[in-house]
Image: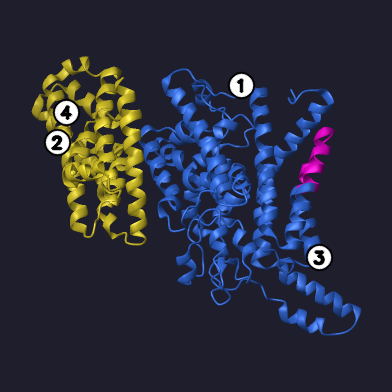
Chain colours: A blue, B yellow
């Protein structure tokens, strides 16, 4: 159930949207020209529009999903086109891998970091995407993102997660029911993490990329040259269609992120150092269990609510579904280590000026109210997460739109 | 020469830990380690297995001397390693299946046959036979020196002592108490995946 009154006031929304435009949107427009300028402006307008709508209506889940789906579905066309322009094919052979021409993917952190450190060799200096996605740059991005919003990465930044997130919402009802008590499914991601870390240590390769990764289907994959590569190819197709499309559709759960992704499990563990968390106000909670039913990662169960833990389980991706669904507004983002969900710093000042007559008092009341809203954990979290998500995926989005325009005008999707 | 073996073990022990930890850690976490005594027992058995493997290899290489060169080739190494991983995989698979309450005949049969102490010993022996880079360095030193079986055994014993230092943190595994039921559940499932991967990809894949 969506609640207009969970949204922010218009001045706050305008201020934050302008800020968002200056720190991300401006960069998509200012340095571009021609078709890229048009596509940059288009993507900026759409994303800032989504952000403003999310803040104004307070419907985090709906607008986050739209944003997330955009990030996912605009990423792969330009990535594939980039591969074909630079390499001539989507397949990656051993030579290319050895020359480190493949971009670093954040999912592989869990598998390759320890072997790389022990072996004193980083296997991803990268050529594609202008050396942007190298091991070290991705490592820095990851550390900053983890500090900022922990496992929020999986619902706001990861351009792969948008696939199962979208398919998990296409069906109106759960056609296959998974009990919220099923710990084996809920924590299977940790099993994958242990498996990937151990197997990668023994073989000194990224076992996840070789054998499991479903996203190779829409990025780069090993050509089929023998029985082993045939099995790898089959597993890849199975995991992509099975875990990113079919199972999310039938279960309404983000199956790939929950059970296959080792990075998600890693984020669950290290995400505890993030500034923000989702908090359940046990006094307001009516135990209607709507949040349990709607959680796409099974991070809420009856025990959580009945035992008054006041927080979801470790696997929470801070997607905001429960926040939007809660009829008693008992769930919200909060700063780690505090029990308060709102900032409340300027509340008394706002009340003082709001009760007075006169235009100046009204303006002061509006300003103090906005300050209070801007400093609330919800506004700060959404702003930080959305900014990060936009930085990570808008470049590919701009490129895809530019290529689409090029396709209509010049008849080719490729730019070179 | 023995001092050199000890230093070689100490300096390259991280590699040994890299090869052994993926087998030993899930094994320890999947077992019911109610006391430090049980944890200690399993680690000692695992290390004893490794020591037996090292002594055997040291003795054979020392006795063969320069003749051993004829056997140390990539194909031979691949086969030995493949066979070791096949058995490691089967044991890990059995360990993982044993803990699943599937109620089927297979689970019951595996549960009857599987003994954790014996598994720890065999896993140690097989990881000891796994020809990792530090192992190769020690092996080549033994057969080049041509000092006989005894010297080979002693060299490998001291090499073993050097590498075992990196296993010391594992003696504290039983101290982890928080959320242990979940750690155990996750480790047991991981044992199944690792078992399948080791047996099929690193085992059969290297043998055929």
Residue receiving disc 3: A10
- The structure residue drawn at horizontal position 18% and vertical position 38%, both measured from the top left corner, is B122
Label 3 and label 4: CA atoms lie apart by 76 Å
In magenta, the rendered stretch is: A25-45
Q: Is residue A307 above or below residue B144?
A: below
Q: Is residue B140 above or below residue A209?
A: above
Nearer-N-terminus badge (1/3):
3
Label 4 and label 1: CA atoms lie apart by 47 Å
Quarter of the image with the N terminus of chain B is top left
Residue receiving disc 4: B57
Q: Is residue A26 magenta?
A: yes
Q: Position of residue A280 (x, y in %)?
A: 55, 69
In this picture, residue A258 sits left or right of residue A397: left
Q: Which mark is residue A89?
A: 1
Could you tell me which chain the residue with mark 4 belongs to? Answer: B
Could you tell me which chain the residue with mark 1 belongs to? Answer: A
Q: Nearer the viewer, residue B155 or A62?
A: A62
Q: Is residue A65 magenta?
A: no
- The structure residue drawn at horizontal position 56% and vertical position 67%, both measured from the top left corner, is A279
Q: Position of residue A211 (x, y in %)?
A: 45, 32
């Amino acid at each position: 159930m969506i609640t207009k009154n969970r949204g922010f006031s218009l001045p706050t929304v305008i201020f934050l949207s302008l800020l968002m435009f200056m720190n991300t949107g401006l960069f998509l427009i200012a340095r571009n020209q021609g078709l890229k300028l048009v596509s940059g402006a288009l993507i900026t307008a759409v994303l800032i529009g989504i952000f403003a709508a999310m803040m104004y209506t307070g419907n985090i889940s709906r607008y986050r999903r739209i944003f997330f789906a955009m990030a996912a579905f605009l990423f792969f066309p330009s990535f594939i086109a980039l591969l074909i322009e630079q390499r001539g094919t989507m397949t990656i052979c051993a030579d290319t891998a050895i020359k480190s021409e493949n971009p670093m993917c954040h999912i592989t952190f869990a598998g390759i970091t320890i072997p790389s450190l022990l072996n004193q060799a980083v296997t991803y200096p990268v050529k594609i995407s202008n050396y942007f996605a190298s091991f070290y740059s991705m490592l820095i991005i990851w550390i900053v993102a983890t500090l900022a919003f922990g496992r929020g990465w999986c619902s706001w930044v990861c351009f792969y997660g948008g696939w199962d997130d979208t398919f998990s919402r296409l069906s109106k009802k759960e056609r296959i029911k998974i009990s919220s008590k099923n710990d084996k499914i809920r924590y299977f991601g940790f099993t994958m993490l242990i498996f990937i870390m151990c197997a990668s240590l023994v073989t000194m390769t990224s076992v996840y990329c070789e054998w499991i990764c479903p996203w190779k289907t829409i990025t780069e994959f090993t050509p089929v040259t023998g029985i082993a590569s045939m099995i790898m190819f089959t597993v890849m197709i199975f995991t992509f269609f099975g875990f990113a499309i079919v199972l999310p559709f039938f279960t309404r759960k983000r199956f790939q992120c929950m059970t296959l992704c080792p990075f998600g499990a890693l984020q669950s563990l290290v995400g505890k150092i993030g500034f923000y968390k989702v908090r359940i106000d046990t006094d307001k909670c009516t135990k209607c269990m709507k949040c349990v039913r709607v959680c796409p990662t099974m991070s809420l169960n009856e025990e959580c609510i009945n035992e008054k833990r006041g927080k979801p389980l470790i696997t929470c991706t801070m997607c905001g579904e429960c926040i939007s669904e809660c009829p008693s507004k008992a769930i919200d983002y909060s700063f780690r280590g505090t029990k308060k969900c709102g900032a409340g710093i300027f509340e008394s000042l706002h009340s003082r000026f709001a009760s007075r007559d006169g235009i100046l008092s009204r303006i002061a009341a509006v300003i103090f109210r906005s300050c209070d809203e801007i400093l609330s954990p919800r506004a700060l979290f959404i702003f930080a997460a959305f900014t990060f998500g936009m930085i990570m995926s808008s470049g590919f989005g701009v490129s895809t739109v530019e290529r689409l325009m090029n396709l209509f005008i010049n008849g080719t999707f490729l730019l070179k | 020469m023995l001092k050199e073996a000890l230093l070689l073990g100490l300096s390259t022990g991280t590699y040994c830990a890299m090869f052994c930890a993926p087998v030993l850690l899930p094994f320890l976490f999947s077992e019911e380690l109610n006391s430090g005594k049980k944890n200690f027992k399993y680690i000692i058995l695992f290390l004893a297995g490794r020591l037996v493997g090292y002594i055997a290899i040291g003795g054979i290489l020392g006795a063969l001397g320069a003749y051993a060169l004829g056997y140390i080739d990539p194909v031979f190494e691949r086969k030995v390693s493949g066979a070791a991983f096949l058995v490691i995989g089967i044991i890990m698979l059995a360990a993982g299946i044993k803990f699943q309450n599937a109620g089927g005949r297979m689970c019951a049969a595996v549960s009857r046959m599987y003994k954790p102490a014996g598994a720890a010993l065999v896993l140690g022996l097989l990881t000891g036979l796994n020809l990792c880079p530090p192992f190769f360095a020690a092996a080549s030193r033994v057969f080049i020196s041509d000092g006989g079986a005894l010297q080979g055994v002693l060299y490998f014993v001291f090499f073993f002592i050097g590498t075992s230092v990196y296993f010391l943190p594992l003696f504290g595994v039983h101290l982890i108490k928080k959320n242990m039921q979940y750690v155990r559940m996750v480790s047991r499932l991981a044992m199944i995946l690792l078992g399948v991967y080791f047996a099929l990809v690193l085992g059969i894949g290297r043998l055929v």
